[in-house]
Amino acid sequence: MLEVRDLRSGYHGVTVIKGLSLEVGNEVFTILGANGAGKTTLLATMARLIPLMGGELLFEGEDISKVPPWESAARGIGYVPQEKGLFPELTVGENLNVGGMIGDRDRQERVDEIYELFPDLAVLEDQLAGTLSGGEGRMLACGRALMQDPKMLLLDEPTAGLSPLYVDMFFESVTKIHETRGVGIVLAEQNATKALEVADRVMVLSLGEAFVIEEAGNLTTEQLKEGYRI
Ligand SMILES: Nc1ncnc2c1ncn2[C@@H]1O[C@H](COP(=O)(O)OP(=O)(O)O)[C@@H](O)[C@H]1O
Ligand SMILES: [Mg+2]
């Protein structure tokens, strides 16, 4: 579905992603890697927020290397940034409705599905997004991206800084989103143990390069340790 060919990207002439190739299908694809490995840069490039310095990005066989972010969203790539990415002055319900501006399925039907997936959000419908806790904000950001009925969802460290209860709940939601909605998932994570539990395949990113791409169950502790060494 999503194909990355010899991708290079970064900031102001600094190359962070250094020639990366991978394919993600209808699966849970986890990206592990130390702080600064380039996970956020890679996801933001896939979401078309950072220009490519080289290589190609294809979605469903079509070149999306140069399309603007709104178009990659419209084509079916949902993106949940590491920071919440919400409208703090709008309510939970209003944030979801803004997300639903892309897509043509009945909007209330989609909102109801999000409340089914994240029941906590239903209770908070009229609360301002800026007043949510960390975990609630992550759920809302994820729900907002899902309002676009994406075919693929890019999640950037959705559980970072959350309490253990929220971490477990969020990983369960990831599995549910993949299994019940048929959405392919690219999940950047620091929490290797939990992320490997929900992953089909895993890539360990090391200094902007794929140290290893492997079936999640086959990744060895040695590979993980070595890939995290910078
Ligand atoms: N806006 C930016 N401008 C310049 N360099 C950046 C910027 N954002 C990140 N970097 C650098 O890019 C590298 C990769 O960062 P990042 O993609 O955030 O890694 P990760 O998400 O794996 O922690 C780091 O060396 C970081 O300092
Ligand atoms: Mg990051």
Image: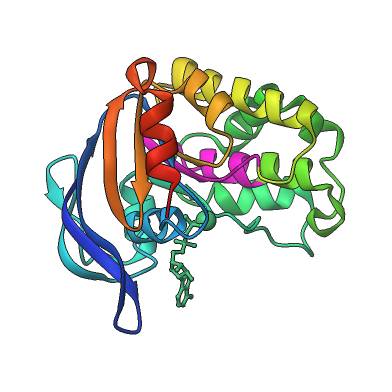
Q: Is residue 100 left or right of residue 164?
A: left
Residue 86 is drawn in which quadrant?
A: bottom right
Which colouring convention does the figure follow?
rainbow
Give the residues drawn in magenta, as a range: 141-159
Is 166 located above or below residue 98 in the figure? Answer: above
Q: Check the image and report above or below for 102 versus 217.
A: below
Looking at the rendered image, the quarter that the C terminus falls into is bottom left
Residue 126 sits inside the magenta stretch? no
Horizontal relation, residue 195 to residue 29: left or right = right
Residue drawn at the location 87% of the way across and 55% of the way down: 131
Q: Which residue is drawn at 35% across and 58% down?
A: 207
Percent position of residue 75, x then y: 30, 47
Please provide percent x and percent y for residue 57: 19, 54
Position of residue 152 measured from the top left corner of the image (x, y, whole percent): 37, 37
Queried whether the magenta region covers residue 146, the answer comes back as yes
The answer to whether residue 37 is visible is yes
Q: Could you say which is closer to the camera, residue 135 or residue 20?
A: 20
Whole-percent x, y for residue 175 in the image: 52, 20
